[in-house]
Amino acid sequence: MTAATTELRAQQDRGRKAAQNREKWSQGRTYISAAVILIWCLAPAYWMVVTAFRDVGFTYDTSILPSHVTLDNFNTAFDTSFGNRFGQALLNSVFIGGVVTLVSLLIGVFAAYALARLNFRFKYLVLGFILGASMFPGVALITPLFQLFTNIGWMGTYQALIIPNISFVLPLTVYTMTSFFREMPWELEESARVDGCTQGQAFRKVIMPLAAPAIFTTAILAFISSWNEFLIASQLSSDATQPVTVAIANFAGAQPNQIPYTAIMAAGTIVTIPLVILVLVFQRKIVAGLTAGAVK
Amino acid sequence: MKTPKFLLPVATAGILALTLSACGGGGGGGGTQAGGGDAAAGLDGRGPITYVQGKDNSNVVRPLVAKWNAAHPNEKVTFKEQTDQADQQHDDIVQHFQAKDAGYDVVDVDVVWTAEFAAKGWLQPLKDKMAIDTSAMLKPTVDSGTYKGTLYAAPQTSDGALLYYRKDLVPTPPKTWDEMMSMCSIAKKNNIGCYAGQFSKYEGLTVNASEAINSAGGSVLDKDGKPSLNTPEAKAGLENLAKAYADGNIPKEGITFQEELSRQAFQSGKLLFLRNWPYVYNLATTEGSSAVKDKLGIAPIPGATGAGASSLGGHNLAVSVYSKNKATALDFLKFMTSEESEKFYATQGSLAPVLGSLYTDKDLVAKLPYLPVLKTSIENAVPRPVTPFYPAVTKAIQENAYSAIKGEKPVDTALSDMQKSIESAGAGS
Amino acid sequence: MATEVGPTPVKAPASGGTPIHHGPKGVGEDNQILSQGKWASWLLAPTIIALGIVIVYPIISAIVMSFQKDAGLDPATGLFTAGGPAGVQNYVNWIAQQCAAPAGGTVACPPGTLGAQFWSATATTFFFTVVTVAFETVLGFWMAMIMARTFKGRSLVRAAVLVPWAIPTAVTAKLWFFIFAFEGIANQLFNTTILWTGSEWPAKWAVIIADVWKTTPFMALLILAGLQMIPAEVYEAAKVDGASAWQRFRMITLPLVKPALMVAILFRTLDALRMFDLPYILTGGANNTTTLSILVINQIRQGFNSAAALSTITFIIIFLVAFIFVRFLGANVVEQSGATGKGKK
């Protein structure tokens, strides 16, 4: 081995080590950033959980660690003896959210395909119309909707809750899907057609898998939007159909004027868990990468 | 160029059709119909009815309704429970009345809503065939259900303000506001706040501000319903609050207090005097975290020369003009305001009764020791402004009282702004 | 490499014209456009109908009512009577901050009426919108970049990021009210005595903090989805070409994530302009935190027709903002960015 080769090897070694160090630093920074994000997102939620486990007589206690721990608040939340229907409300919310998500995805995918792929007059008008639906203050829609649904006898039914939610979520669904469809490699669809698929088959088999991140993201957005909706639900739902947001707002303290913070926090904790599980299960789908190799 | 031209016209046509059909049915909002004709309908109707009330925290209504249903199998009452929030209860009732819903027969209304709902023609006048005996009820409560001389809502439960004080630091409670302020030196010595009520910008502020003004001898509205705030008494009343805040006798955080936060401050020993509703008594004497369990006393709120004029709280029962079974509704009303039911409200729900005799009932006083003091409070109570424009009036009071207390504007300006705002509200036409 | 050259950016012309595919011109093309139009109608029909019923009908209903006067009180009977037509009076009253005078006519709205709050509510709404969207975009982008990387515990971070948004607003608002109470955990933890809900700037920042905490996940999620669509090979190629991290960010990430980013910012802005729940529960609109939606709800209790006029004004304001967005800031969802290649834009 010549001195030059040894020197070269040494240089390569140093370069590799430097790269590894940079990698480590970069990983380290990533972990620190991840920790900061965790703290920022979870700190208030932690406070919610701590309060949920705290005895109602000590609601305003500010010790950071759990104190006066009890499960009473969770019992109170689910207690049905005073007309609270929290359990039922949970099921309602899941049902409504599910239907809203599925239907708005379906409708949204159709609309997005048309807007992203097809050419027609009035396209901008339609886009503007869809966006315009997100511009009116929701608080002012309550009274007309109330009267409309009273007139057609749909007060307190599931459809009275589902249909408005679909309409609220639709503009976002359509726009998100449209912007993603615009970025799709449509040549793939064409190659599939060349290979003998119909347009529908090509769409289903080739494009949809690639659009999976967009679809699952939109699904989560739609579900959580519907989950969070309160104003319309408070006016149009009945005792049997009320979603979780209304049920929580109905929590009352044992005395008039008393606000049951601990019970509300318990309800909030209960409500968050299924969502977290849902996300954990689906999060891999959200980040499925683009299998760009298909075109090569 | 064939393009989806048919789509938009179809959509437009559909929408127009819906608009027209819905307009025919529900009518425009804003409650502009006077339900005069409806008042005469259904007076003899008997049958199942629905009773609407806010959250039944203490499970008082359900047993009563069950009792009624057992005795009246053909005229069953369905209990529809609303949320716990007064604002939402109000909006819910408004929505249903605007839609002329016959499904809300008997409605539980907050004392300040009577004028508004009566003026919109939604409430059945309780006279002639629908008359109800109110002679045994405390007068201020009956007044709260009356609009323009006619009774529209029967008093059901009442509420008045109490002054909670630390009897370990102050053996005898103050009788006047000035006396209370002079006792603030004791608070300073013990390093705690002197006095607090509810001063956050919400309905509670209207309650506290009206109390201050009324206790000083002034009034927000005169008997014709016109604002009368440009009086020295009104000024003195509001000045009391503003000065106390500026001097630190009302702690700085008092401006964020609603009922619960003020209760918390008193319970953790940080206040010498607290103005709040009776519900505090139970919690302050039993809750684990309360530092004042054996140290609290109750008294009527202080006024200018003696007991102050508490704001009247409570709820009344009204019958909807759109109800089809008004005879049943009236009987149910009488049942719910009978002495037995009233006693049940008190023992089961700690809700102050409207029948004067119950305040000296031995069993009740044993359970609710504050009852005698509360009776004084209610007898001297002045309702919050009785006006069909209550939402606008309460906003006007809140905005200006808040600024006055914080010292953002002088009391004179605040009162004159309040006056002008209320005049403007009543002028809308 | 996915594709070397995407189709050239095509502006969909207003009067249907050049189809996307290059094909033989002639009769066949007209048929194609025809069938595209028909296809489009069927695909878009459900959307248009759903939006028409639930949103357009109430809007039209509200606009019709905004040209009516609110009910006035008949002094003789003490009952409310219908107000009658008002023309544009309701609108003028809001914009000029005029209120009814007892002697007839109008007078400048005294403090304490809702009419006196129109312009301050507008300013507050814009302030909240600009600040919250700015914070949420930057924070959301940062979170998305972290979530896109590979590291142990990544799924935990992703789930954690969604927690703020998943908790129902009813609970979040009360939670923050609780945290920001004078004796609450915020003051305890940082050893401060700030009157969070009792003075102007702390109240504004309380609303902003609560809103940013709650809604950043929305931005992060959309941006993450956008980031995921960028093929890794593009970054590899750039690294090979010697681009620094910042250059990669500026020339690859930003342009390629722009469509998703623009949709996120656009919708977030529209939502922020209609902000209602958080300030309402946190401060009740006190201390200059009243937004236009809070003003609408308060007005609904006092007179629905005037509230309808205010909603329509809000609608127009939001429309103008969206218009500026799409026109000048390039939130152009329809245009193909042509950036599936080297992404120079």
Image (cartoon, helix red, strand yellow):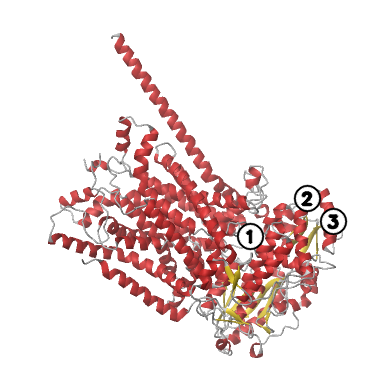
Instruction: Single out the mark in the foreground, 1 or 3.
Output: 3
Of residues B70 and B285, the one nearer the viewer is B285
| Residue wearing tag 1 | A259
Q: In the image, are marks 2 and 3 on the same chain?
A: yes
Quadrant position of the C terminus of chain B in the picture: bottom right
Q: CA distance from mark 1 to mark 3?
A: 31 Å
Of residues A39 and C127, the one nearer the viewer is C127
| Residue wearing tag 3 | B183
Q: Which mark is residue B192?
A: 2
Name the side, left or right, on which B62 lies relative to B338: left
Q: Is residue A66 in view? A: yes
x and y, in percent, of residue A241 in the image: 48, 67
Q: Amino acid at mark 3?
A: Met
Which chain is indicated by disc 3?
B
Which chain is indicated by disc 1?
A
x and y, in percent, of residue A165 in the image: 43, 63
Bin the neighbour count of mark 3 within 10 Å (Cα to Cα): few under 14, some 14-19, many 20 and up.
some
Q: Amino acid at mark 2?
A: Ile
Q: Amino acid at mark 1?
A: Ile
Instruction: Single out the mark in the foreground, 2 or 1.
Output: 2
Name the side, left or right, on which B66 lies relative to A296: right
In the structure shown, which secondary structural element does the residue marked by tag 2 occupy? loop
Q: Is residue A136 in view? A: no
- Above or below, B235 relative to B189: below
